[in-house]
Image: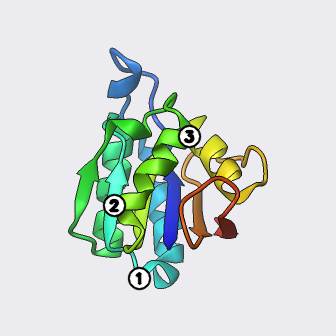
Amino acid sequence: MKVYFMRHGEASWNASSDADRPLTDNGIVRLQATLRANVERMQDVEHILHSPYLRAVQTARLAADVLAVKSLSEDARWTPDCDPHQALDMLESFSDRTILIVTHNPLVSQLVGGFCGTGVEPFDTGTLACVEADWPAMGLGTLRWKS
């Protein structure tokens, strides 16, 4: 299986709650640049799974536009403080598809690091990574690239 992980773009602090923080203009521009720079090697993305937080929803929609992906879904198991083991377990249902997951820190850093057995993997806003594995379980993934 191949899974792409992306941390949402730079978000504003002007919001009534953490879940309602929108992307900044700079965040949008940087996300578009990152996605366009990687569009060739991400042509295999079939589905985008994302957190319900506004900045992740906006990031997922930008990715869908740039990558021409029509299939998106939202899942609350991808919010910042969710359990990395539970998030990884739910990937079993996508083991036969190539997906992009748009999520948050600290979850994405803990999950990718645990999946690949590298410890906590740093993810700045807008960071994108490709992980391959035979099965979604801690320590079984290989980090192929990060941008």
Q: Position of residue 143 (x, y in %)?
A: 68, 67
Amino acid marked by disc 2: Ile
Which residue sits furthest right?
118
Amino acid marked by disc 3: Pro
User: Which residue is found at the position 51% from the left and 55% from the top?
Assistant: 6
User: Which residue is found at the position 46% from the left and 23% from the top?
Assistant: 13
Residue 14 horizontal side relative to residue 114, left or right? left
Total numbered labels placed on residues in the image: 3
| Mark 1 residue element | loop
Circle 1 Cα neighbour tier, 10 Å, few/some/many (<14 / 14–19 / ≥20): few
Amino acid marked by disc 1: Gln
Q: CA distance from mark 3 to mark 1?
A: 26 Å
Taking depth in this image into account, of 93 and 132 the one nearest to the observer is 93
Tell me the number on the disc at residue 84: 3
Sequence-wise first label, 3 or 1: 1
Tell me the number on the disc at residue 43: 1
Q: Position of residue 65 (x, y in %)?
A: 28, 67
Residue 102 horizontal side relative to residue 142, left or right? left
* Quadrant of image for the C terminus: bottom right
Q: CA distance from mark 1 to mark 2?
A: 13 Å
